[in-house]
Image: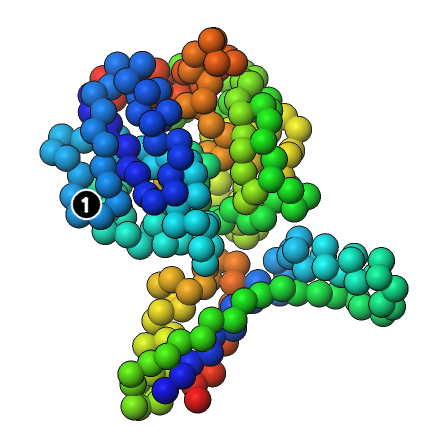
Amino acid sequence: MKAAVVTFPGSNCDRDLAVAFEAAGFEVARVWHKDTALPVGVDVVGIPGGFSFGDYLRCGAIAAQSPIGAAVRAHADRGGFAIGICNGFQVLTEMGLLPGVLMRNAGLKFVCRSVMLKVATTASPFTQSYAAGQELAIPIAHHDGNYTIDDAGLQRLKAEDRIAFTYAANPNGSMADIAGVLSANRRVLGMMPHPERAVDPVTGGADGQGVFASLMRGMALA
Amino acid sequence: MKARVTVMLKSGVLDPQGEAVRHALGSLGFQGVTGVRQGKVIELDLAHTDAAKAEADVRAMCEKLLANTVIESYRIEIG
């Protein structure tokens, strides 16, 4: 299975994400934002955390319009898998691949600490290795993670079981405690917490491994 | 030709930064500030000579990049 990790100017979790994919058994290709195509045979695209383009205009807005953005959109439209973490989640919403937006944290502060997440659905290629309702310790590090969506959109997410993760204790004002959401075809996940920072007990926990292990397992079956 | 785009959060969308400014004004002793909304102004220098064409183009820019219309509204002034 092949993963591509995109790097924008200002990305700072790209290497961690590549290491997490590799640890789960993926072959990883690194892709630059000016590339106009993904490497041949890519199964999953990872959009990493960081501060792409300095968060200018809005978080993720410039990255969403970068040359590689069109290739990522085409990959998702073909039914390809994609995961956006933190700034990557913001990029995916700005691309329109995921609904809603990430607004400034309700407390206005940058929040950087480990939080408890609940696995809200196991019916996804990203969460199937977890148990329903399982609690995970995963770090967050963001200023704009306050997930916001209109009422109709929220009802739709709930009705279609597309909320992947929720916060056990809401750190940022997110609607319905949402920490991560899935696309309608369940093959695109955006989440603010950083599972790629929780894949090795040596560096503070391995609860994030399941995201990558789920994906590996799901794609082997697909 | 110049264009000025004002991007604001739509009414009904909670603006945490505006709220923080409102609280700060209150603590400075300014009474009677019942609401603060914070937005941004983007000024564009355009090579256009036709105002209608300029407005149409700037509208497309707003829809594509300058505003996130999920939560933001925009106003365009051409002059």
Q: Is residue B76 left or right of residue A216?
A: right
Q: Is residue A115 left or right of residue A129?
A: right
Tell which residue pokes out farthest to the top in this image.
Answer: A201
Tell which residue pokes out farthest to the left in this image.
Answer: A40
Residue A5 figure quarter: top left
Q: Residue A80's x, y, as percent?
A: 24, 35
- The quarter of the rendered structure image containing the N terminus of chain B is bottom left
Q: Nearer the viewer, residue A115 or A150?
A: A115
Residue B38 figure quarter: bottom right
Name which residue type carries label 1.
Asp
Residue A92 figure quarter: top left
User: The disc numbered 1 marks a residue on which chain?
Assistant: A
Q: Residue A100's x, y, as percent?
A: 48, 48
**Mark 1 surroundings within 10 Å by alpha-carbon count, few (fewer than 14), some (14 through 19), many (20 or more):** some
Q: Residue at x 61, y 58 (%)?
A: B13
Q: Residue at x 40, y 53 (%)?
A: A61
Q: How many marks?
A: 1
- The quarter of the rendered structure image containing the C terminus of chain B is bottom left
Which residue in the protein does label 1 denote?
Answer: A35
Q: Is residue A191 visible?
A: yes
Q: Residue at x 42, y 81 (%)?
A: B3
**Quick one: SS at disc 1?**
loop
Q: Residue at x 64, y 34 (%)?
A: A171
Above or below for A147 versus A215: below
Above or below for A51 versus B8: above
Q: Residue A22's x, y, as percent?
A: 28, 18
Q: Is residue A84 visible?
A: no
Image color mode: rainbow
Q: Nearer the viewer, residue A167 or A132?
A: A167
Q: Residue A69's x, y, as percent?
A: 27, 48
Q: Nearer the viewer, residue A147 or B51?
A: B51
